[in-house]
Image: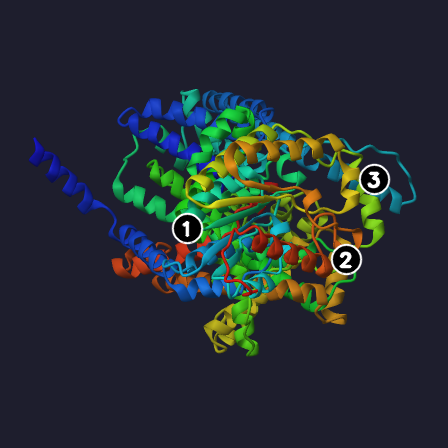
Amino acid sequence: MVNRLFISSFKIIKRLPKAAAGSLTLFIVINAIVLNLNCVWQLLYLYSNPASDDPIRMEAQLHLMPHEKEKYRVFLTGSSQTREDFDIGYINNQFSNCSAIYYNLGLSGNAQPIRMYMTTDSMLPMRPDIVIYMPFIGSLYSNYDYTSMPYNFEEKIIPLFFEYVKPDEIYMKGEYFLKSITGKYLPIYRYRDSIKTILMSYFGDTFHGTYRSKTEFHAYTNNLPDQYFEDEVRKAGGNKYTESPYTDFNKKCFKLFAHEIINSGARLVVIKGPTHPRLMECFSPSLDVAFDEFFDQQSIEQGFLYISQEEMPHFVPADFIDFTHLNDFGIRKMSKYLCDYMYHSNLISCDSGSR
Amino acid sequence: MLFNSFQFAIFFITVFILYLLLKNRYRWQNILLLLASYTFYGAWDWRFVFLLVGTTVLDYVFGLKIHRAKGQVVRKLFLAFSVFCNLLVLGFFKYLNFFIGSFHQLMLMLGVNIPFHIINIILPIGLSFYTFQSMTYTIDIYRRQTEPTRNFLDYALFVSFFPVLIAGPIERARYLLPQIRAPRALSLSNFYDGCFLIFWGLFEKVAIADNLAKIVDPVFLARQPYYGADVLLATYAFAFQIFCDFDGYSNIARGLSKCMGFDIMANFNLPYFAKNPREFWQRWNISLSTWIRDYVYISMGGNRGSELTRYRNLMITMLLAGLWHGSSWTFVLWGAYWGFLIILNNLWGKVCLKAHFYADSLISKLGFAIRMVFFFQVICVGWLIFRAQSVSQLINMVQSVTGNFAISQSYSSILMDVLPVGLIMISVLLAIQIAQYVSNNLLVVLSLWWPARSLLFCMLLFLLILFGADYGKPFIYFQF
């Protein structure tokens, strides 16, 4: 019986199209080789564009991290706020003698906890010592952005979707789940838009004989005029951010996110993202209170540090490009604050006088 | 449910698994395919399922009546009813507003202002294709080229067969019905061939056509002023876009059918390798061109009668072929353009014969490739007419090519992003097509040594994943 099964299986395998099998094998092998080449990730990291290529930049940074840890690893995570509001070069310079290295892993979008929870599987194996997460009001009080799902998808999120999201909505968004599952096992599919633009930039530079020497983190440079804020406040009508069906889902994911980080041995620091004073006119003040209460309570329950707006430097309109992103003045203020906080809170041990 | 969507993939896999489970029970397979076809059509708009059922019932009944009728006059009457009803449906949904608007414009030109009202009519998807497919049944019965089927479900499946329902190929009753009425051979080789056709069709649509759309749409959807170089580049890109879009769809349709044991006609045979208008129409949208030839041109008399009669028949046929594509004067102009070219080609052939030359002898000295390239320009002029949104846009674009031959700044920045990818894709397409032409075999890829095929498939897979657009752009011929 076993022999017959073996023979019939062998016959089936013999009849399988060699070309299709060969091409799939070749495809998998080339993928595996290319995705394990440091030079490829270095190219992807160097030529990644801020905002559009944040997910591939994050993965490139994680991939390029040495396995042997020589320094403290501090991961700055969160939304485009994280990416824009910190001068990573300045910060690393401040801590160059402190055996600490900071990585800016900010991702374009609201960086809601639903998304952040999915990043732990790729982040935590790199053994960060400190994870700094910078949410803002939109992280808890807006709808989930399904277009971001394919970039960081992990299967562990699926049961939570069934718990918190209505079945008809899941059905309507089914294509995102399919793309996410495909992207999970095919990084070249997941990042194809970024790979295309990065390759075009690289070949363009090669053609012109120029080469990039450092990665760009800042996408936004021009301060928006006052009229923009006026128009946006009017458009928002006090409802830019509201309790949404995803608020509880986000809160649950944050708890899981925090739990995983703390369980891994890393310290978690949550900083409330600085926002333009006029953003407060776009939503109900009670949401701001609820936001602080939630993170305050979680910080006590889970054991992490929560830095609210009151503890941070005072940001004025002149510090902002738009409602949520800082300009050069604001970035300097924020980066200095972070360095001082990290130094004085002894989260990172430095030799005295080394800064 | 677009062929290039995840929903369709799940749909087809489900249907195919059930189809395999019903092996050796082709009647049950037919019922499954019928239900699947109506589900597929209903997914677009459930209201038009009734229209599909209506036209199906109509032609099924007329088919039987034509066959059973004793006298030729009665047979002709039933055929006329069938054709009339099909064309009435097509005319109402597709051309009513066009004719109303054109009549109003004509009256205005004559100084008569007649108030009119455009009715908001949605064109049912696939109408142009399945009405023509259905008409082949009654016409072939009338011509005694096929027997009617007594099984309504078989006929219903013939009309609604989902791989070809939305955008063809327009199958003939005498070719597809016998396959429906008999058990199909399910074989691994058919399955592999089918998978290749689906893969290649997807590549043509998703990797080539949808990328070229990014070069085409910004020019043709823009307002004045037009720049000549923009128009030229967009027209060339459109030539490849429309071919890959339509050929891609047809290949996917063939591939899906082949997996299930059906043999569907190839709708394209390397049309851009044609050297003259007649050859082009023997290679482009073959199912439509042969339909128009067999059921319109030949019915009007074809080549019989005087030369003037023949040219008249040719022109009317091509005008109708143009009009079939859509309710716009640009399509009529496009049909007229090809009618004119075919007549000119016939006249040229006569001139050469009379001068004791063979039809292409003078030009044949220029070489095969040059003739092809030259004729490709002629084809592209037709595509400019076809793609223009209106006659006024067409005129403005032609004027820009002759009078304002420059490239706009906004378009040049689009080209910087998209053109390299477009050129790579067209190169891949041309390489494969040259191999197909030289070997005179559309499936030449399948006869390559297997390591070479592996390499080719792997490269196509990388290109498809990296450059394939996945925003589910509909097929161009859906709008017809």
- First along the sequence among labels 1 and 2: 1
* Coordinates of residue B357 in the picture (x, y in percent): 49, 74
Tag in front: 3 or 1: 1
Assign the C terminus of chain B to one quadrant of the image.
Answer: top right
Q: Please give the residue where the numbered disc 2 appears in the rendered image.
A: A223
Number of marks present in the image shown: 3
Task: Compute the Cα span from label 2 to label 3.
Answer: 19 Å
Judge from the rendering whether residue B411 lies leftward or rightward of residue B159; answer left or right.
Answer: right
Which structural element holds mark 1? loop
Identify residue type, mark 3.
Arg
Badge 2 marks a residue whose secondary structure is: loop
Residue of label 3: A234
Q: Amino acid at mark 2?
A: Asn
Q: x%, y% of residue B47? A: 60, 24
- For mark 3, name the chain: A
Front position in the image: A282 or A255: A255
Q: Residues within 10 Å of mark 2 (few under 14, many from 20)?
A: some
Cα–Cα gap, marks 3 and 1: 45 Å
Q: Position of residue B360 (x, y in %)?
A: 50, 70
The colour scheme of the drawn protein is rainbow
Say whether disc 3 or disc 1 marks the residue closer to the N-terminus: 1
The chain letter under disc 1 is A
Q: Nearer the viewer, mark 2 or mark 3?
A: 2
The x, y position of residue A257, in whole percent, is 49, 38
Taking the image as shown, residue A23 lies to the left or right of residue B329, namely: left
Q: Residue A127 shows which numbered tag?
A: 1
Q: Nearer the viewer, residue B432 or A156?
A: A156
The residue at 65%/58% (across/down) is A336
